[in-house]
Amino acid sequence: MAKKSVIFLINGLGIERPGSYSIAIDQCMPNLAHVKETSYFTTAYTKSLEYRGAYQRFFLGDTYSLELSYINTNVINQQLPGNPTYQSFQQSVSGEGKLHIFVEPNDKQVVDIINNLVNSLTLPEKKEIYLHLLLSQLTVSDYKDLISTVNYIKYHLNTHITVGFIIGKEYFTENPTKDENDFAKKLLFYCSAERWIDTDKKLLSLQEANIRPCVAPGFCATNTCFISNNDTIMFFNTRKDDYDKFINSILNNAPEAFKTDTFNLPMYSLIKLYSKHEIPAFSENVEYKSSFSLLLEKSDKEALIITDEKNIGLVNLLANGLNNVNNPSIQFMKMNDTYYNDYNNILGLIDNSIYDIIIFDCFMDKGQTVNDIKENLTKIDIILGNVAKVCENKHSLFITSLYGMKKSLPLAPYNTEMVTIDYETQIPIFFFDYSYPKGKYRLYPGETNDILNSAVRCVWDNSEVYTLIRSKDILVNLMSAFKK
């Protein structure tokens, strides 16, 4: 029988932070408690409380860095000279109007690529170029990294590029009210919204007010960054995305701002947008070379993912590198507690199937009370017990999570005392495999994508695939550290 790799996800499970209400996991999950006694253990750091972002990180890794690398290598450095969209863009910015570049500030690497793009253009002397930041970060705890990134961007941009306005990506709504339209005009067309040269102080004030970055009201970092008729707009997006609420806030307010219905605002995007507007793009899509699907293709392996029915579409999209395809190497089954409570069904699924990698995708965070969560963990533990028994001395087993939960809940329907469960920062990784004796190997901390890669490595001995399982030999560990 061929060795398999099994990943058992208990999403929402994390390591309790100080002040968190204790659920007594070991009492709810005796099978997990038993497995912990014999497994390797380490932690992964996660910044996500939002399941979509957590799955994306798991199946694709650091997508933003991958996207920037792809754009710099395949779009900026190679395609621009002969790219018809770039030629149209070059012609548009050669006029007297301003150039407005909209970007999500998720990584400091974006600065060099924007500088490279602007340097490639033949621009009139004293061309006004403004970089507008769309904040997509989801939690208030993101402000610390965001402030560092924004300050880095401000001070490493070419001298002729200026940071303009900064606003939450989701601030504008689908059907804006009159007040929202009035604010859009003030911010985008008149620069008469709040002005903060010290952007870090403004971001700190938003943090103190508990306003998430993605919905933060806009403010200006200068008073000259307003959009004028005949300006050019570039969306420096790293993936297909939907910016229509933002685009609409520009196009719907322009006639009144410019006092004419026949305005000219050429718009471009780096990667083709999901948009009802026809916006020329430099490239159709980004190829995610680190995606789970390509890893399976290279290793000639097949995977089965067991998840809630409502989750299959999202997981399929991300596992296939943000492509909606029917991939024969990735199959799905619906999560069904009754079916997986039967040991024989688990045995058949793991031992007697064609799949090399099997992912059980369970959710800790179900129900409206702490008691609901405890009951759900008890159900999950029964399935885990069957999985662990099948895997013992035969297969690799990882028990982990993609994100930690943080929420306030009543204890029970009959006890409305509110408590806070806080597993936000770290998630556990439990691992055991008979072929990796503890005396010779250990498990190192990492990111959630490293867990997936490690599972693949257990059934495909390829040194190019990074793994958290490393030899205790000092020299090997040093080489692994440098590679990381």
Image (cartoon, rainbow, N blue to C red):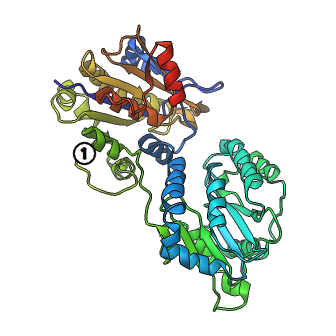
Is residue 181 visible in the rendered structure shown here?
yes
Residue 20, percent across and down?
Answer: 61, 27
Specify the amino acid type for callout 1. Answer: Ser
Residue furthest top in the image? 439
Q: Is 225 left, or right, of 336 in this rendering?
A: right
| Displayed quadrant of residue 99 | bottom right
Q: Who is closer to the viewer here, 65 or 313?
A: 65
Residue nearest the observer in this picture, 447 or 465: 465
Q: Position of residue 350 (x, y in %)?
A: 22, 29
Residue 273 visible to the viewer: no
Classify 280 as above or below 373.
Answer: below
What's the residue at 58%, 39% (across, down)?
Answer: 47
Instruction: Please say if 134 is above or below 371.
Output: below
Comparing 22 with 103, the one in front is: 103
Q: How many marks?
A: 1
Q: Quadrant of residue 297?
A: top left
- As helix, strand or loop, the secondary structure at mark 1 comes to loop
From the viewer's perspective, is 345 left or right of 401?
left
Residue at image coords 79%, 74%: 126
Residue at the (46%, 32%) spot, across then down: 373
145 over 416 or under it: above or below = below
Which residue position holds label 1? 329
Give the quarter of the figure containing the N terminus: top left
Horizontally, residue 215 falls left or right of residue 346, namely: right
- Crowding at dot 1, Cα within 10 Å, few <14 / some 14-19 / many 20+, comes out as some
Q: Residue 15 location, x and y as percent?
A: 55, 25
Q: Position of residue 191 (x, y in %)?
A: 79, 71
The part of the image, by quadrant, that contains residue 336 is: top left
